Amino acid sequence: MNHETNKKLNNKGFSLVELIIVIAIMAVLIGVLAPQYLRYVERSREATDVDNVEVMISAIEMYSADPAEAVVTGTLTCTDGTVAAAGAVGTDGTVADALNTNGIDPANLPDMGSDAFQNWTITFAADGVEFTGTNGDALATALGR
């Protein structure tokens, strides 16, 4: 009798059933919370992409607004998430020169991290800005243009 009492008092571990219950509760929580987390991460990527494109467009528009500079014509293109600026640095009126003049390295533009903005083209002309491509309309809407 004394031996059984000592055994119960010294038993400070978890039973297998208790561990299984805890693991089951954790699995349910992960199953519920993981999709929410993934949506949150994707929304963050989309917001970052929109901000990056807005900064590039603003830099090009500021360059074009300067009377000492040429009006920018050309394209800013994103293909499979990789952004490229048309033209060469040092050539007045190119997209690359406009970005470079405003402190953005056209050879090192940020890639698009979200799935929503992987393929688009922004065309700059004397009469305005045009969005085309698979995700062009979505990007224009996100930018409020």
Image (spheres, helix red, strand yellow):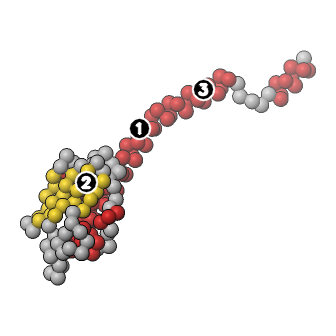
Query: Picture coordinates of residue 56 (x, y %)?
Result: 26, 65
Residue 114 vertical position relative to residue 94 in the rendered view, above or below: above
Query: Picture coordinates of residue 102 (x, y %)?
Result: 28, 74
Residue 142 visible in the picture = no
Cα distance between the residues tagged 2 and 1: 28 Å
Cα distance between the residues tagged 1 and 3: 23 Å
Of the two numbered discs 3 and 2 on the same chain, state the one appearing first in sequence.
3
- Density class for disc 2 (Cα within 10 Å; few <14, some 14-19, many ≥20) is many
Cα distance between the residues tagged 3 and 2: 49 Å
Circle nearer the viewer, 2 or 1? 2
The residue under label 3 is 21
The residue under label 2 is 78
Give the left or right position of residue 41, taking residue 104 as reference. Answer: right
Residue 40 visible in the picture = yes
What is the three-letter code of the residue carrying label 1? Answer: Pro
What is the three-letter code of the residue carrying label 3? Answer: Ile
- Secondary structure beneath disc 1? helix
The residue under label 1 is 35
- Density class for disc 3 (Cα within 10 Å; few <14, some 14-19, many ≥20) is few
Residue at (32, 73) in percent of width and height: 103
Query: Picture coordinates of residue 144 (x, y %)?
Result: 20, 57
Give the left or right position of residue 18, taking residue 88 as reference. Answer: right
Which quarter of the figure is the C terminus placed in? bottom left
